[in-house]
């Protein structure tokens, strides 16, 4: 009998945890976006704050591997023609960079400070995109 | 000890211990301690790199060794060596080493596990293992060296605390999430350590019981679930009554007498968890999650994933409950008895799915991971041919291997089901609902492993 209570408690816990979503619903994306929490949140951020991500660099190597080469972090998620770019969903780094940048911006850091922190944290990954410095 | 090694008339010199090197190894005081030292040193390295190494998971020693090499190889060890990993596990070793100095300093209580721990221990393991699977996916532990380090530290502290509270290894037996996994999968092993019960009945010391780190009594032990092959019983037995023997893999699944509802639940839970951890790597997963996020109140990915996680587990366990109920109705046997007994038949399926899931990690990412680990340690050798790191086996090769392993697992589960029915003298109709459920689970696995995988590239 007690085993049944344990099963019931586990089920209840699952239901409670299922309600723990904190994101707001922002538009619709292609299916490739829905492959991880980081991917979905970063595409939502790209739609919400494209200008912010345009000022931030990406360090994943897309400056060399993407065709055409990406010029900033926004282009990992949204192509210059406005369509969604699949790269941000298949790369495990772009989303992390975008969400870090957003978290630091929410902490109250200026764009320049966010950029400096990104450089410090991610420069070991290699050459960043040729994103103009923030004046 | 030497006379034991040289005599040839006792069970302990039969089976695999007929071979002198293996016998000498099993009786050696260096087994398992020398391996424990090696794995503890490995753990120290892993923790160092986890917290002080590069943040790039694909280049960090901690993440590549833990998740790309050790984790995919571990299930293979269960198949051939049972729970032997638990004997050399660094987390448990640190706890064991702390017990004696802890007692001297008055820090170790050295208690016997209480009744509640014995009664609910397996349930705690079921919960901790499911929780670990959920945490891994939700917080992407494998994609973060720091998170990997934190997880290992938490497990290490758990093992240490339990070692100070209780004598022997209460952590491994009753709480460790990996212990749950290894205990269940060790039932499929091709070897077993067993005692000659006729000799044991003449024994007055029962030294084997006192020496067993997992509180097993070899005289009554009929399963590998709580045997880590540490050899303590072998060394302490004055009668040479204990032998290490080969056997048909998984034979105990239909032979052992003590089946538990909790362990049966864990076995079916493993089927569900392996499914969950693979299906979210396939291409159609994105379509499914898009539908959930856009058409339900679950707007966050983790909320949608958690709901799916709960639903798949509920579906797996619920359908097993229905199969057990139907089986009970058809045979006139109580639900609890059927539920407790037949769940073990699904273990080969879960293990084959687990091995299949790990094929892609091991074969596609393994060679590069070995080279990365060597590079991180500053070892300037090219152990892995460049051809393998640059062009690992293609995905179709991996899929063929996976389906082959899965087919063996499905066949083994069906065979175990049949043997359980025959062994217990039940009507053949008792097994039908379980054959139907096994067919359903197998079909779900086959379809899943044939789906195209989601392309991802790590850094």
Image (cartoon, coloured by chain):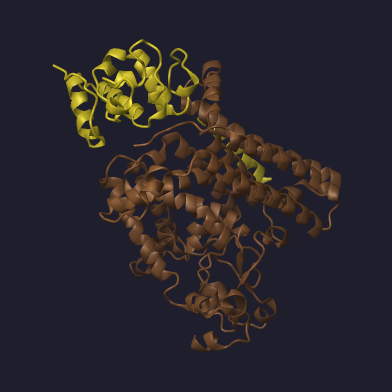
| Front residue (pair A124, B319) | A124
Quadrant in the picture for residue B36: bottom left
Q: Is residue B4 above or below residue B420?
A: below
Give B10 or B406, whichever is nearer the viewer.
B406
Residue B49 percent across, percent down from the top left: 29, 49
Would you say residue A20 is visible in this rendering?
no
Residue occupying the point 51% across, 31% down: A17
Give the colour chain B carries in the figure: brown
Image point (41%, 41%), residue name: B142
Between B243 and A15, the one lying in front of the other is: B243
- Extreme-left residue of the structure: A135
Chain letter for yellow? A
Q: x and y percent of residue B126 in the render? A: 57, 47
Residue visible at 31% across and 24% down in the picture: A98
Q: How far across and how far down the image is residue B143, in percent?
A: 38, 39
- Which quadrant of the structure image shows residue B433? top right
Q: Quadrant of residue B312?
A: top right
Q: Which residue ends up furthest to the top in the rendered image?
A: A81
Residue A114 visible here: yes
The residue nearer to you, when weighing B161 against B155, is B155
Q: Quadrant of the C terminus of chain B?
A: top left
């Amino acid at each position: 009998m007690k085993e049944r209570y344990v099963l019931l408690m586990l089920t209840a816990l699952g239901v409670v945890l299922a309600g723990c979503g904190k994101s707001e619903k922002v538009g619709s994306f292609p299916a490739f976006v829905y492959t991880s929490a980081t991917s979905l949140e970063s595409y939502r951020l790209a739609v919400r704050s494209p200008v912010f991500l345009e000022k931030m660099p990406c360090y994943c190597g897309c400056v060399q591997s993407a065709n055409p080469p990406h010029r900033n972090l926004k282009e990992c998620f949204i192509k210059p023609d406005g369509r969604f770019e699949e790269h941000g969903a298949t790369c495990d780094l772009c989303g992390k960079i975008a969400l870090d940048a957003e978290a630091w911006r929410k902490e109250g850091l200026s764009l320049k400070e966010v950029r400096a922190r990104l450089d410090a944290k991610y420069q070991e990954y290699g050459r960043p995109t040729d994103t103009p410095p923030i004046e | 000890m030497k006379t034991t090694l040289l005599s040839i008339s006792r069970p302990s010199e039969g089976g695999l211990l007929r071979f002198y090197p293996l016998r000498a190894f099993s009786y050696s005081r260096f087994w398992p301690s020398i391996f424990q030292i090696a794995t503890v040193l490995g753990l120290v390295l892993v923790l160092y790199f986890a917290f002080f190494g590069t943040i790039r998971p694909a280049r960090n020693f901690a993440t590549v060794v833990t998740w790309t090499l050790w984790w995919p190889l571990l299930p293979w060890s269960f198949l051939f060596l049972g729970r032997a990993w638990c004997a050399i596990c660094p987390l448990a070793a640190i706890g064991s080493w702390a017990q004696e100095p802890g007692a001297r300093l008055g820090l170790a209580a050295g208690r016997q596990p209480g009744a509640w721990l014995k009664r609910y221990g397996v349930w705690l393991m079921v919960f901790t293992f499911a929780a670990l699977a959920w945490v891994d996916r939700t917080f992407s532990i494998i994609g973060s060296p720091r998170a990997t380090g934190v997880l290992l530290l938490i497990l290490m502290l758990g093992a240490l605390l339990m070692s100070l509270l209780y004598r022997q290894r209460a952590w491994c037996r009753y709480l460790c999430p990996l212990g749950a996994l290894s205990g269940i999968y060790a039932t499929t092993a091709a070897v077993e350590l067993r005692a000659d019960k006729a000799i044991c009945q003449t024994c007055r010391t029962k030294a084997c019981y006192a020496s067993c780190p997992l509180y097993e009594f070899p005289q009554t032990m009929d399963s590998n679930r709580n045997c880590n092959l540490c050899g303590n019983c072998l060394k302490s037995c004055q009668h040479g009554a204990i032998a290490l023997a080969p056997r048909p893999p998984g034979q105990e699944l239909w032979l052992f007498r003590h089946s538990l509802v909790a362990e049966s639940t864990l076995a079916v839970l493993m089927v569900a968890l392996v499914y969950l951890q693979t299906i979210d790597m396939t291409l159609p997963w994105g379509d499914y999650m898009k539908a959930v996020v856009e058409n339900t109140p679950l707007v966050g990915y983790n909320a949608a994933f958690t709901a799916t996680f709960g639903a798949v587990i509920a579906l797996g366990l619920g359908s097993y409950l229905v199969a057990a109920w139907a089986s009970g109705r058809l045979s006139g046997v109580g639900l609890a008895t059927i539920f407790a007994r037949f769940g073990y038949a699904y273990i080969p399926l879960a293990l084959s799915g687990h091995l299949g899931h790990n094929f892609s990690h091991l074969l596609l990412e393994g060679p590069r991971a070995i080279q990365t680990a060597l590079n991180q340690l500053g070892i300037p050798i090219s152990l892995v041919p460049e051809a393998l790191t640059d062009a690992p086996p293609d995905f179709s090769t991996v899929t063929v291997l996976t389906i082959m392993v899965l087919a063996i697992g499905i066949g083994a589960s069906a065979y175990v089901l049949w043997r359980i029915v025959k062994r217990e003298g039940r009507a053949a109709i008792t097994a039908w609902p379980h054959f139907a459920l096994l067919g359903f689970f197998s079909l779900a696995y086959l379809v899943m492993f044939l789906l195209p995988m989601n392309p991802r590239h790590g850094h």
